[in-house]
Image (cartoon, grey):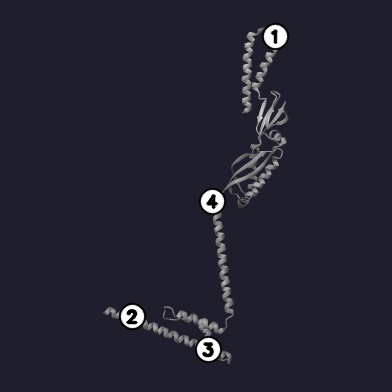
Amino acid sequence: MAAQNFKYLVFFTLLAVLIGSIYFVIVFQDFIITNLIWIGLLAVFTFIVYKYDFILQLVDYERAVIYRFGKVHHVGGPGWTWIWPIVEKYALVDLRIKTLDVPKQHVVTKDGVEVTIDAIVYLKVKKDNQSVVNSVIEVEDYVKASQLFVISSLRDVIGSMMLSDVIANIEVINAQIKENLAGISKNWGIICDSIEIRDVEIPDVVLNAMHEQKAAVQQKLARMEKALAQKAEIDAVREAAASLDEKALAYYYIKAIENMANSKGSKVFFPSEFTQLASSFANSTTNSGKNANKVEYYKTLLKDYVDSSVKKAGLRNSHSSNKKSIKKSKKKD
């Protein structure tokens, strides 16, 4: 901008000089005729100043690649840089970080799922003079070239991975694409600061199926844990029962039948195990010693249990008959 203002200042200054020259021509015709060559040179200089930039003012993040007769001569900037009109030309280079918003890409993964990838790239030109020159002469447009390469690399990398791997390895994908870009752009004079995949859009159908699969896995694990708990409980009962002797088993057995008799029903059905128990008693009567004592003990337990059960059943029956008689008397009244 300052260079442009300086150009206009020079133009108006030369214009004033030209007007003064015209006045001078009118007043000093003889002098002009004798100095016509110098006047022509002044006119040519005025045209060149107006047509071409010969002074560049470059800020700290700008560089100018200057060509002389079409060949790179030097790199100018920052600050003021002189350009010879007609003889030299220049190309400006911005050293600031470029932010490339890669358009959303529809990529098919290895397992056939189409996902939408949204990525962003940060890159810049390195500050050394050779890198500034390479960013102009080695590639036509390093920004566009980098963007197209990232798009192609996204398709290659993600297309070779399963969907689950894509979701779990975003950082790995970023590093791989950055490495690929660095490999192809090593002669472009640029450096890639970062590549970030901002979003991976998965179709709703696939996403719902993944949620259902995860829920099924959790239910399976819950069932397995429940089965293991039941197995542990059964094993604990088995170990406890293995340490009980016959007297303890008979006691718990009869206690269980007693609890059944205390229910609301008035009838007690003895399980078939009583037949086996009676057989064992019958077989034990032929023995002597400890077996005879056991038989007597079991007979006593069974007799006491049967007597108590019959007594309780009689009490319940009498109590129920009393209730029925009371209800009938109330109805007659």
* Front tag of 2 and 1: 1
Q: Which of the marked residues, 3 or 1, is nearer the chain's N terminus?
A: 1
The residue that label 1 is drawn on is 34
Disc 1 marks which amino acid? Thr
Residue 51 percent coordinates (x, y) = 64, 22
* 112 versus 63 height, above or below: below
User: In whole angstroms, how far apart are the C-alphas of marks 4 and 1?
Assistant: 93 Å
The one nearer the camera, 230 or 14, is: 14
What is the crowding at mark 1: few (fewer than 14 residues within 10 Å), some, or many (at least 20)?
A: few
In the image, 9 versus 119, the foreground residue is: 9
User: The C terminus is located in which quarter?
Assistant: bottom left
Q: Secondary structure at mark 2?
A: helix
Q: Nearer the viewer, mark 3 or mark 1?
A: 1
Disc 3 to disc 1, how far (Cα)? 158 Å
Residue kind at label 4, given as amino acid type: Val
Where 46 sits versus 293, above or below?
Answer: above
- Specify few, some or many for label 3: CA neighbours under 10 Å numbering under 14, 14-19, or 20 or more: few
Q: CA distance from mark 4 to mark 3?
A: 72 Å
| First in residue order: circle 3 vs circle 2 | 3
Quadrant housing the N terminus = top right
- Amino acid type, residue under disc 2 in the picture: Lys
Q: Is residue 178 left or right of residue 302?
A: right
Residue 297, numbered label:
3
Q: Is residue 160 visible?
A: no
Report helix, strand or loop for mark 3.
Answer: helix
Q: Quadrant of residue 67?
A: top right
**Of residues 216 and 121, the one drawn nearer to the viewer in this rendering:** 121
- Which residue, given by chain and number where applicable, does mark 2 sit on? 324
Residue under the image location 63 percent in, 42 percent down: 121
SS of the residue under disc 1:
helix
Please state the horizontal and vertical placement of residue 266, each as a whole percent of the image: 41, 81
